[in-house]
Image (cartoon, helix red, strand yellow):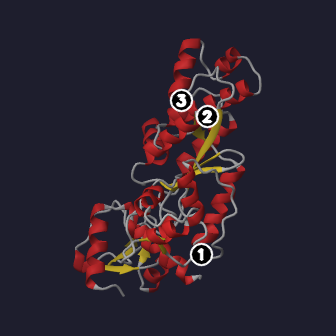
């Protein structure tokens, strides 16, 4: 059972639909007999009508049934059937330019498709489809095809229109044949959705979707590498998705997915030191500074910790203040506490 202060904290998170609390608690509503996740869009119950649980299993055992709106037994923001259908349709014919009639044939409302894609991927269906076409165009260019061929396969009759669209989505003109292509995928986890960015060799970014400043982190990544970032999957992303599932289920705390660290020599040394911290243990910023033989560099260690772009695998959540307080965490303090406690169970 949670104490009164914790229940009040969770109730405030419920009222604000705070996604940082996904997977941290579930709320049972006495008056309706259902239990929900923190971000449920349904009308909020009174505090005295709420019971809070650490797991969905506890809520079920307390005789609450799962809410049909937020579906607490599925991953948060799990992909909808409409989005699944349209993503598959794009994969079946990625060079297709969609028209209104195509949606009618699938019995899908255009505005619904636009809204659900915007919520899921941060872009409309049309933007997603265009990104996919552009990704193929880039692939053709890298494999030696003429720009004009890539332009036409992407559905652009005007070369200037093709270049403008390409630059807007990819961040560079298509004449740059050495352009690095990174794929970005949405990964559902118990603590909320994460975004993974990788190529065929390494993972470059892994962050919670609601991480503060995520858009700027992605922009910096694209700028530093002169890279195109497009929707898609790679074997690296599939590997890390599997490893994350094992991690959250408590089956394994080990990550073997190759990662690509981008930063100064000092930052990289800090991140490598973080990976030496065993699961279930914590270190202070001072501990890390001393291990690097720079005992006065606590603040620099803290900045490097905050600049980490590969959450969980580079375990910046295991670093706390010298006084034992948790300190900051871009994914949210509640998540940080959950991750530390989760790892202690399997130490």
Q: CA distance from mark 1 to mark 3?
A: 39 Å
Q: CA distance from mark 1 to mark 2?
A: 40 Å
Picture layout, residue 117 above or below residue 187: above
**Residue that numbered label 2 is attached to:** 132
Q: Secondary structure at mark 3?
A: loop
At x 53%, y 34%, the residue is: 103
* Disc 1 + disc 3, Cβ < 8 Å: no
**Pointers 1 and 2 in contact (C-beta within 8 Å):** no
Q: Percent x, y for residue 95?
A: 66, 28
Where's residue 76, x and y in %?
Answer: 47, 61
Residue 171, labelled with which disc? 3
Q: Is residue 85 above or below residue 344?
A: above
Residue positioned 60% across, 61% down in the render: 272
SS category of the residue bearing label 1: loop
The residue sitting at 63% across, 37% down in the picture is 90
* Precedes in sequence: disc 2 or disc 3: 2
Identify the element where label 2 is drawn.
helix
Viewer-nearest of discs 1 and 3: 1
Closer to the chain start, of discs 1 and 2, is: 2
Mark 1, residues whose alpha carbon is within 10 Å: few (<14), some, or many (≥20)?
Answer: some
Task: Name the residue beneath numbered marker 1.
Answer: 278
Residue visible at 59% across and 12% down in the picture: 159
Q: Residues within 10 Å of mark 2 (few under 14, many from 20)?
A: many
| Image quadrant in which you'd find residue 275 | bottom right
Q: Is residue 30 left or right of residue 56?
A: left
Determine whether, in the image, residue 134 is placed left or right of residue 294. Answer: right
Which mark is on residue 174? none
């Amino acid at each position: 059972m949670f104490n009164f202060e914790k229940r009040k904290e969770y109730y405030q998170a419920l009222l604000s639909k705070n996604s940082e609390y996904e997977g941290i608690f579930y709320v049972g509503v006495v008056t309706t007999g259902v239990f929900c996740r923190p971000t449920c869009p349904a009308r909020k119950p009174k505090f005295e009508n709420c019971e809070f649980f650490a797991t969905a299993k506890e809520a079920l055992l307390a005789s609450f049934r799962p809410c049909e709106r937020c579906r607490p037994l599925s991953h948060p923001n799990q992909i909808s059937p409409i989005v699944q259908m349209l993503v598959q349709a794009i994969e079946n014919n990625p060079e297709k330019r969609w028209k209104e009639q195509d949606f009618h044939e699938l019995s899908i409302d255009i505005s619904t498709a636009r809204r659900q894609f915007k919520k899921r991927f941060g872009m409309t269906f049309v933007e997603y489809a265009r990104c996919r076409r552009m990704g193929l165009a880039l692939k053709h260019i890298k494999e030696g095809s003429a720009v004009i061929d890539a332009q036409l396969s992407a559905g652009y009759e005007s070369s200037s229109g093709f270049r403008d669209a390409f630059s807007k989505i990819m961040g560079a003109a298509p004449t740059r044949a050495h352009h690095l292509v990174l794929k970005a995928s949405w990964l559902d986890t118990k603590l909320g959705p994460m975004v993974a960015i990788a190529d065929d060799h390494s993972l470059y970014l892994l962050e919670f979707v609601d991480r503060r400043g995520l858009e700027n982190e992605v922009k910096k990544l694209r700028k530093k590498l002169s890279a195109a970032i497009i929707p898609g999957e790679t074997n690296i992303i599939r590997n890390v998705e599997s490893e994350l599932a094992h991690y959250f289920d408590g089956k394994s705390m080990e990550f073997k997915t190759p990662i690509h660290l981008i930063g100064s020599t000092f930052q990289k040394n800090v991140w490598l030191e973080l990976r030496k911290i065993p699961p279930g243990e914590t270190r202070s910023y001072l501990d890390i500074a001393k291990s690097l033989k720079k005992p006065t560099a606590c603040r620099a260690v803290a900045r490097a910790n905050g600049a980490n772009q590969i959450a969980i695998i580079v375990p910046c959540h295991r670093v706390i203040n010298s006084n034992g307080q948790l300190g900051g965490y871009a994914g949210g303090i509640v998540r940080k506490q959950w991750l530390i406690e989760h790892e202690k169970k399997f130490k």
